[in-house]
Amino acid sequence: MTETSPSATRRHVLAGTGALGLGIAFSGALPELFAGSAAAQGLGHGGYGPLVPDPQGVLDLPKGFSYRILSREGDRLRSGEGQVPSNHDGMSAFEGRGGRVHLVRNHENRATGRVPVPTVEGLTYDPAGKGGCTALTLDSRDRVLSERVAIAGTAVNCAGGPTPWGTWLTCEETEDKAGTNGYTKDHGFIFEVDPVDPHRTGAVPLTAMGRFQHEAVAVDPRRGVVYETEDAFEKPFGLFYRFLPHRPLGGRGSLRAGGRLQAMRVPGVRDLSAIQETGTTFDRIEWVDVPDPQATQTPIRFQDFGPKGVTHAQKLEGCYWGGRSVYFVSSFAHSAEGSAGDHYGQIWRYDPERRRLTLVIVFGADTDVQLPGESPDNICLAPSGGLMVCEDGGGAQHVFGVTRRGEVYPMARNRQNTGTPEEPEWGEFAGVTFSPDGDTMYVNCYTPGTTFAVTGPWRR
């Protein structure tokens, strides 16, 4: 998730702009992205206005909005288990009793993470792993009631996704095996996390779902099929997968029963970046069984899928379910790094019933890369009828909103400078999600690890 595009250095000119003027260019059918959003009418009025500089120098928001810091790295966990870990990443919110909200938050710590996830008996997969998840319980006013370790001993927990039965699937974005970086077990798996009582799920890898550099997942709520993205950093790039569980929609723990892992093949297309025209549609998408989901000898994307091969894409990131389809994001593609084409972000839609893949949105190549907006990453549907996109690049870092009419607007800007006044740096946003009632947006700053609750006139 922290890989950046070559345009990053040219975007430092935005350091003091507050993103008041946007130069995002894209094409596509924006209303299609919001299938399944709660409000049919959407915003459609250019968002909530310009960002107002935060006098505390933490988070800029539009007028009428405010934030609460729920948690920061290095603080003490309320459970007494240790410190709040660093590298806040993917996150989801779950409904609790009495108006409570349960947040599950990933920590993308590698072997040298600044503040590791504390090891806890019954919740630790590999004591040498520094990553994992923490869980927060909030009351109806977003006050933190509890904060504790939800899983530990994993590695590079990047994104993931919620299940229809109310658990979180956390993904390891690594392929390191036991003996690498001091690890005592193989890594590169998905783990299920119960947000209410993590001991009910423990630290059990869902090995049948594959061992690779996982990014995000989305679950088909009617069929139980799990879609997975792979963020591979070098060619051959990642694949788009589906997992067919033996016990679809079986509830907590059912994914341990196994299933079939398959990779997507778009007939005649080896690299999705070669497709540049929005609205391009491919019918009769094929799914090919993965020869060795455990990647015991060879990483999956290198394995032999036959003479027709499978379809790759650079920087596959966010993944979510909307309406009757799954959407997935390619943050960017650079031909200089081996991709078939160049772009600053694509959003694809796959319709399982029709076996149809459509390119919905393209950011650039006519995007002015000196302005914000390229490299879309974590994405979520907003209850007011729009989309929230976390930007993953260099320079100024924002959460952008996209209305159903296709208008792009700044929603938040990180003001926590981790560099110097002469060469400022800001951590990316990640894990954007909304409370079940739609009144609060929760979002993470990756570094310094900070979790925010943002409230305001969302339904205006």
Image (tube, rainbow, N blue to C red):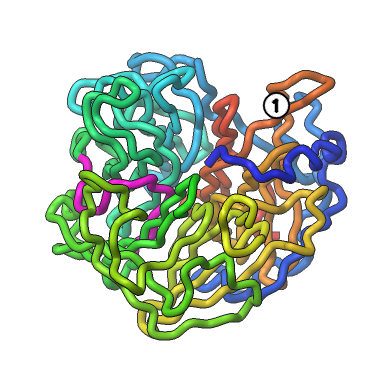
Quadrant of the image occupied by residue 53: top right
Residue at left 31%, top 41%? 188
- Residue 434, above or below 74: below
Residue at left 55%, top 27%? 449
Residue at left 78%, top 31%? 54
Residue 131, position as x, y percentages in the image? 38, 28
Camera sees residue 308: yes
Give the residues in magenta. Answer: 205-219
Quadrant of the image occupied by residue 61: top right
- Label 1 Cα crowd, 10 Å radius (few <14 / some 14-19 / many 20+): some
Q: Is residue 390 left or right of residue 80?
A: right
Residue 179, position as x, y percentages in the image? 25, 25
Residue 65, position as x, y percentages in the image? 71, 43
Q: Which residue is mark 1?
A: 416
Q: Is 448 in front, or is 166?
A: 448
Q: Is 309 in front, or is 73?
A: 309
Q: Amino acid at mark 1?
A: Gln
Question: Furthest-front residue in view?
Answer: 307
Camera sees residue 97: no
Q: Circle 1 — which element?
A: loop
Residue 279, position as x, y percentages in the image? 61, 80
Q: Quadrant of the C terminus?
A: bottom right
- Residue 313, above or below 32: above
